[in-house]
Image (cartoon, rainbow, N blue to C red):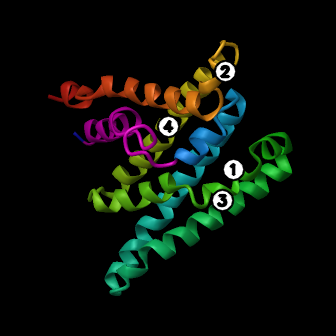
């Protein structure tokens, strides 16, 4: 039964409740870093790492805060944890993968303020997930981020070779493509419930 719940949480986070395409969290890196496939994958890997570790650290911290009547500090504490993890990722990338570090540019420090990372940590608690379910949801949310980024990077790379009318070039065609990508995920609605019914 536990594996069934974990699989359900994972599929839901990746497909039906995708944090970018259905909850609209993390739109800034989605639009900013998705021009090339390799940077989209690199950014997604960094987000998966930060999301998973942030959830692992913030879940017990939240228990501590609630037990000591300090629940009102939840958001501040979570942001500090995420900022520290992003600094760790930045240091590692700068030292070991400088090409990816340079290609991500300003978007790497923006993971700190990426509302998808903070949203996952808070929504894990609000949903009443156990620690294991929270970890699976975080990994699923990160994988959903990766799927959305890779799909959108593919769409944007194809758009570069198309003859787009002048009035749609730039941001307008990017937003149209983003909305169509988002609509494609609506096809997964009811999938998880159908599998486990």
Q: Earlier in the sequence, mark 2 or mark 1?
A: 1
Figure check: 173 above or below 81: above
Q: Quadrant of residue 80?
A: bottom right
The Cα–Cα distance between marks 2 and 1, rounded to whole angstroms, is 19 Å
The structure residue drawn at horizontal position 66% and vertical position 59%, both measured from the top left corner, is 86
Q: Which of marks 2 and 3 is nearer the N terminus?
A: 3
Q: Which mark is residue 107?
A: 1
Closer to the camera in the image, 99 or 155 = 155
SS type, badge 3: helix
SS type, badge 2: helix
118 left or right of 183 in image: right
Q: Which of marks 3 and 1 is nearer the N terminus?
A: 3
Residue identified by numbered label 2: 157
115 left or right of 37 in image: left
Q: Is disc 2 surrounded by few (<14), some (14 to 19) or many (20+) residues within 10 Å? A: some
Percent from the top left, x then y, of residue 75? 45, 72
Q: Is disc 4 surrounded by few (<14), some (14 to 19) or many (20+) residues within 10 Å? A: many
The Cα–Cα distance between marks 4 and 3, rounded to whole angstroms, is 18 Å
The structure residue drawn at horizontal position 50% and vertical position 56%, both measured from the top left corner, is 115
Q: Which of marks 4 and 1 is in front?
A: 1
The Cα–Cα distance between marks 3 and 1, rounded to whole angstroms, is 11 Å
Q: In which quarter of the image is residue 67?
A: bottom left
The Cα–Cα distance between marks 2 and 3, rounded to whole angstroms, is 28 Å
Query: What is the magenta range?
Result: 2-26
Q: Are marks 2 and 3 in contact (CB under 8 Å)?
A: no
Q: Do the residues labelled 4 and 1 touch (CB within 8 Å)?
A: no
Q: Are marks 2 and 4 in contact (CB under 8 Å)?
A: no
Q: Earlier in the sequence, mark 4 or mark 1?
A: 1
Residue identified by numbered label 3: 86
């Amino acid at each position: 039964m536990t594996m069934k719940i974990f699989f359900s949480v994972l599929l839901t986070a990746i497909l039906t409740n995708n944090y970018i395409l259905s909850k609209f969290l993390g739109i800034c890196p989605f639009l900013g870093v998705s021009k090339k496939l390799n940077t989209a994958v690199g950014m997604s890997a960094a987000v998966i790492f930060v999301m998973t570790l942030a959830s692992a650290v913030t879940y017990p911290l939240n228990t501590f805060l609630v037990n000591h009547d300090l629940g009102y500090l939840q958001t501040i504490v979570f942001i500090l944890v995420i900022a520290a993890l992003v600094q760790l990722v930045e240091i590692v990338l700068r030292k070991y993968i400088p090409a990816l570090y340079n290609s991500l540019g300003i978007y790497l420090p923006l993971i700190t303020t990426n509302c998808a990372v903070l949203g996952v940590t808070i929504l894990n608690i609000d949903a009443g997930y156990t620690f294991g379910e929270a970890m699976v949801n975080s990994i699923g949310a990160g994988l959903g981020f990766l799927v959305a980024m890779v799909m959108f990077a593919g769409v944007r790379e194809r758009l570069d070779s198309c003859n787009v009318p002048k009035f749609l070039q730039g941001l307008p065609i990017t937003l149209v493509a983003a909305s169509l990508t988002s609509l494609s995920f609506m096809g997964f609605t009811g999938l998880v419930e159908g599998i486990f019914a």
